[in-house]
Image: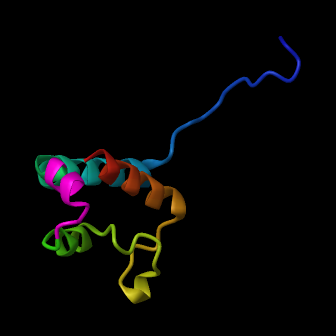
Amino acid sequence: MIPNAFRFLDFDLGETADMLRDSVQSFSEKELAPRAAEIDETNTFPMDLWPKMGVLGVLGVTADEEYGGAALGYLEHCVAMEEISRG
């Protein structure tokens, strides 16, 4: 064995992050991808998508539940934003 070598690196982000990724990816493919060119050209974000993103739960990912958020961490926030940026 090589000294100081890692035996195992776990890059799993966890079930919560995976579920969030799947739901935001589905939303992005359905709602954002068809409008991506328009969003890029106008450099604006469609106002009708904000309520839909609220229902999805991505607007308050890191906010406490008592304030209507999901009480998740910044890892989950990054996962959600990454999927939205792919849309």
Is 39 in front, or is 71? 39
Image colouring: rainbow
Q: Residue 41 placed where, x, y %?
A: 20, 53
15 vs 50, left or right, is: right
Q: Residue 44 placed where, x, y %?
A: 23, 65
Q: Which residues are magenta?
A: 37-46
Which secondary structure is most common in the magenta stretch? helix
Residue drawn 47% across and 81% down?
A: 64
15 vs 41, left or right, is: right
Q: Residue 33 placed where, x, y %?
A: 17, 47
State which quarter of the image contains the N terminus.
top right
Numbered circles on residues, count: 0
Q: Residue 71 placed where, x, y %?
A: 46, 74
Residue 38 drawn in magenta: yes
Is 13 in front, or is 52? 52
Image: 17 above or below 7: below
Residue drawn 50% across and 45% down?
A: 13
23 vs 75, left or right, is: left
70 vs 26, left or right, is: right
Farthest residue in the bottom direction? 66
Observer able to see residue 32: yes
Residue 82 drawn in magenta: no
Is 30 in front, or is 42? 42
